[in-house]
Amino acid sequence: MNGSGRSRDKITVDELCAELQVSRSTFYDWRQKGRAPRCVKLPNGSLRIRRNDLENWLTDCEGGA
């Protein structure tokens, strides 16, 4: 897999918020409460969410609905 393919398996916080239609503050509130999908913190401090972790998190949310 090349570098561009690998980067597509991770999304930014902005992409996640747009996809879920939530604000950044909602995402960070979830994160603080331990309710957000798992994140990868990059050396520059920015966050990425693995697509697989997001899909698993959404599946878990369906179970609680």
Image (cartoon, helix red, strand yellow):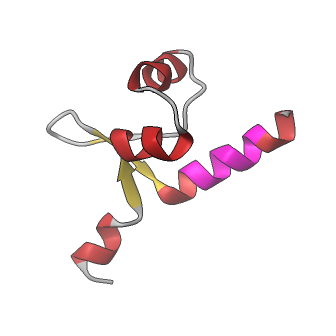
Q: Is residue 37 toward the left or the right of residue 12 in the image?
A: right
Q: Is residue 20 toward the left or the right of residue 23 in the image?
A: right
Image position of 53 with respect to 37: above or below: below
Task: Specify the segment rendered in magenta.
Answer: 54-61
Residue 8 x, y percent position in the rendering: 36, 66
Residue 51 x, y percent position in the rendering: 50, 57
Name the chief secondary structure element in magenta.
Answer: helix
Quadrant that contains the C terminus? top right
Quadrant that contains the N terminus? bottom left
Image position of 55 with respect to 13: above or below: below
**Magenta-drawn stretch contains 55:** yes
Residue 18 x, y percent position in the rendering: 44, 42
**Magenta-drawn stretch contains 62:** no
Q: Is residue 23 toward the left or the right of residue 65 in the image?
A: left
Q: At x 49% / y 16%, what residue is drawn? A: 29
Instruction: Confirm whether residue 48 shows in the render.
Output: no
Q: At x 67% / y 46%, what residue is drawn? A: 58
Q: How many marks?
A: 0
Q: At x 25% / y 74%, what residue is drawn? A: 4
